Image (spheres, grey):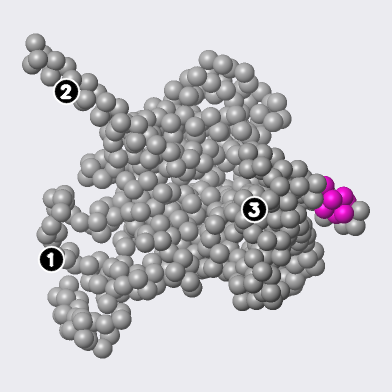
């Protein structure tokens, strides 16, 4: 116990907790969690970014709070305790979004509330926060939030670019291209194509990192 | 022929192991086996004895598609001149065909170049032989496109179908969905205005609708029916009749309009035994039965449409003959084939009549059933095992007595 407390805040082990979800242990493309919201909110870049920030905040603080409480929770009721903590945080985030970015909050609609059921958050609480100290748990939450966010932003970028010809609401494909006969791809805005895009990201990820391929 | 053989023989040492062009081995192999029946035979494992191998099989399907393609070319020109009210040009078969050929050929070329290009690249990268599956898909894709489809959209759709629909699953023989229909589905959902509506079925009508004569709508019979339903009018069709549908002089995708041309193709496929007659007939039966059921309900005029009209209209016949019978994506068991076919027909008519958003249900119905095929096959096999187990038990009981 005593020798562990001297561990520096950003030791190699802690940094690994933070960065491994970016790539090799990505919650979306490797663990295939949180797919539902990844498909639902990524038709435009802006909601995708706001959503990933929200999930990151909720995930980090839920991890932190649960980790602080971990020795006092009877294991039989741990799920309900987790839900109460996450729900409280989600309500905070929801109110914050409504107050400051109302239009995005409208677009995200029910999916902010559904962060409560996001498998990534429940998964991290169960798998990590209940067995680890507050600081590593906090880093783990942020790491997984960012790992989720990376995929959402990449999806949002390509879906908005190819589906609507805009990025962050600004037109980026010049009018001349449209005059030439180019058309926006309506399928990119539909959830099925988001699923296929996630598949393509997983494909690229695996072909670059051979250790992910199952035997 | 001799000349070709000589050239290939001369090139062969270069692409074999150790030769300087070994990296192009797959490409050479593809061309050689396309031109000449290869000498190699399957040596081990279970295999089917047949006089023709896969490339020759595919060739027969392409042959069966030729009547539909030729008529599609003629009809493209015919509809174009009809929309302009040019009666002199309509009278000349040659003028119509010539015009249509120049409209349709580019689509066929784009489809083949893009599709085969991707197949060759994928085969080279993996060191496989080039798959022969695209010979048929490359011909099917143009025939289910509207004649006015922009070429780059055909290219994108084809690329999507070949990469996501086929190569991802492991190439020819491994795909879940029919690649040609996937190309059309991609086009349908991605570039909806270019593959649905009234004006796109006729060459030149989208860009230059000013010259079209009064009273000519350009809608396919199915769209017309759906519109009639929406407008609550008394009759479903005003522009065309049963004879037009059988001959095929109606607006529609390039190859799907002519019932006669498709039936010639069906005869070729059935005579050579390439397509399953079980699937083909059960699709028609399913569509007809569903039409009859709607006749019984008779809620609106679309439901009261004579059941056999469904089989003649739109892509029903084309889908039944060329799409549903795809040996890879259809059911493998004989009972499964009948169930699969019936459901394809039933769902196609169901989508047509009940959902006015999609005037043509055949594409969606076949793709849906493609996804259901493993389930159908699984239960057919399970039922068979159960039945035989029961018989086994009875036999042992008899012996015990």
Element assignment for label 1: loop
Q: What residue do we see at 31% from left, 61% from top?
A: B132
In front of the other: label 2 or label 1? Answer: 2
Residue B339: where, in percent of width, then height? Answer: 37, 30
Q: Which residues are magenta?
A: A91-98
Residue denoted by label 3: A130
Can marks 3 and 2 be said to lie on one chain?
Answer: no
Q: Is residue A13 visible?
A: yes
Q: What residue do we see at 57% from left, 23% from top?
A: B303
Quarter of the view holding residue B119 = bottom left
Report in which chain the residue with disc 1 lies. Answer: B
Q: Which mark is residue B39?
A: 1
Quarter of the view holding residue A127 = bottom right
Judged left or right of residue B266, residue A103 is right
Outermost residue, bottom side: B20
Cα–Cα span, label 3 and label 2: 55 Å
Report in which chain the residue with disc 3 lies. Answer: A
Q: Nearer the viewer, residue B344 or B99?
A: B344
Judged left or right of residue B281, residue B55 is left
Element assignment for label 2: helix
Q: Residues within 10 Å of mark 1 (few under 14, many from 20)?
A: few
Q: Which mark is residue B392?
A: 2
Judged left or right of residue A167, residue A77 is left
Cα–Cα span, label 2 and label 1: 45 Å
Dominant secondary structure, magenta: helix
Q: Can you say whether A147 is above or below A39 in the image? A: below
């Amino acid at each position: 116990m005593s020798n562990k407390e001297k561990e520096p805040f950003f030791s190699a082990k802690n940094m690994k907790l933070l960065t491994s979800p970016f790539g090799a242990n990505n919650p979306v493309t490797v663990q295939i969690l949180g797919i539902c919201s990844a498909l639902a909110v990524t038709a435009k870049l802006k909601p995708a970014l706001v959503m990933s920030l929200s999930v990151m905040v909720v995930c980090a603080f839920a991890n932190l709070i649960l980790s602080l409480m971990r020795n006092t929770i009877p294991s039989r009721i741990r799920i309900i305790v987790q839900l109460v903590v996450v729900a409280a945080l989600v309500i905070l985030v929801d109110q914050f979004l409504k107050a400051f970015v109302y239009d995005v909050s409208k677009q995200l609609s029910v999916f902010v509330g559904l962060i409560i059921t996001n498998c990534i958050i429940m998964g991290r609480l169960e798998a990590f926060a209940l067995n680890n100290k507050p600081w590593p748990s906090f880093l783990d939450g942020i790491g997984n939030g960012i790992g989720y966010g990376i995929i959402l932003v990449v999806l949002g970028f390509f879906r908005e670019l190819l589906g609507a010809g805009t990025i962050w609401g600004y037109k980026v494909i010049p009018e001349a291209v449209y005059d030439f006969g180019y058309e926006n791809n309506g399928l990119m805005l539909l959830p099925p194509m988001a699923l296929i895009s996630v598949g393509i990201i997983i494909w690229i990820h695996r072909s670059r990192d051979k250790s992910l391929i199952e035997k | 022929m001799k000349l070709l053989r000589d050239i290939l023989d001369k090139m062969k040492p270069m692409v074999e192991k150790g030769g300087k062009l070994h990296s192009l081995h797959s490409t050479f192999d593809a061309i050689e086996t396309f031109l000449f029946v290869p000498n190699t035979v399957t040596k081990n494992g279970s295999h089917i004895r047949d006089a023709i191998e896969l490339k020759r099989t595919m060739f027969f399907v392409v042959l069966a598609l030729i009547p539909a393609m030729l008529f599609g070319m003629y009809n493209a020109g015919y509809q174009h001149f009809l929309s302009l009210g040019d009666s002199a040009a309509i009278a000349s078969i040659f003028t119509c065909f010539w015009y249509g050929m120049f409209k349709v050929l580019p689509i066929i070329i784009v489809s083949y170049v893009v599709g085969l290009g991707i197949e060759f690249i994928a085969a080279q990268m993996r060191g496989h032989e080039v798959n022969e599956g695209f010979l048929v898909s490359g011909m099917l894709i143009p025939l289910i496109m509207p004649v006015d489809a922009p070429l780059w959209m055909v290219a994108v759709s084809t690329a999507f179908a070949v990469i996501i629909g086929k190569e991802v699953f492991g190439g020819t023989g491994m795909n879940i969905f029919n690649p040609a229909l996937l190309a059309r589905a991609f086009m349908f959902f991605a570039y909806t205005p270019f593959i649905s509506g009234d004006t796109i079925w006729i060459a030149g009508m989208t860009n230059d609708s000013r010259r079209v004569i009064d009273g000519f709508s350009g809608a396919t019979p199915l769209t017309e029916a759906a519109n009639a339903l929406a407008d609550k009018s008394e009759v479903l069709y005003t522009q065309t009749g049963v004879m037009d549908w059988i001959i095929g002089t109606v607006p529609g995708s390039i190859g799907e309009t002519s019932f006669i041309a498709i039936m010639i193709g069906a005869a070729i496929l059935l005579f050579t035994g390439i397509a399953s007659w079980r699937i083909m007939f059960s699709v028609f039966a399913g569509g007809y039965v569903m039409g009859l059921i709607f006749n019984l309900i008779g809620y609106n005029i679309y439901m009261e449409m004579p059941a056999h009209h469904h089989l003649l209209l739109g892509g029903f016949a084309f889908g039944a003959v060329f799409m549903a019978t795809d040996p890879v994506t259809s059911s493998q068991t004989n009972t499964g084939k009948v169930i699969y076919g019936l459901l394809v027909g039933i769902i196609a008519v169901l989508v047509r009549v009940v959902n006015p958003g999609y005037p043509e249900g055949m594409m969606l119905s076949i793709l849906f059933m493609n996804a259901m095929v493993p389930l159908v096959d699984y239960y057919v096999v399970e039922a068979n095992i159960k039945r035989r187990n029961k018989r086994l038990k009875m036999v042992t009981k008899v012996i015990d007595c």
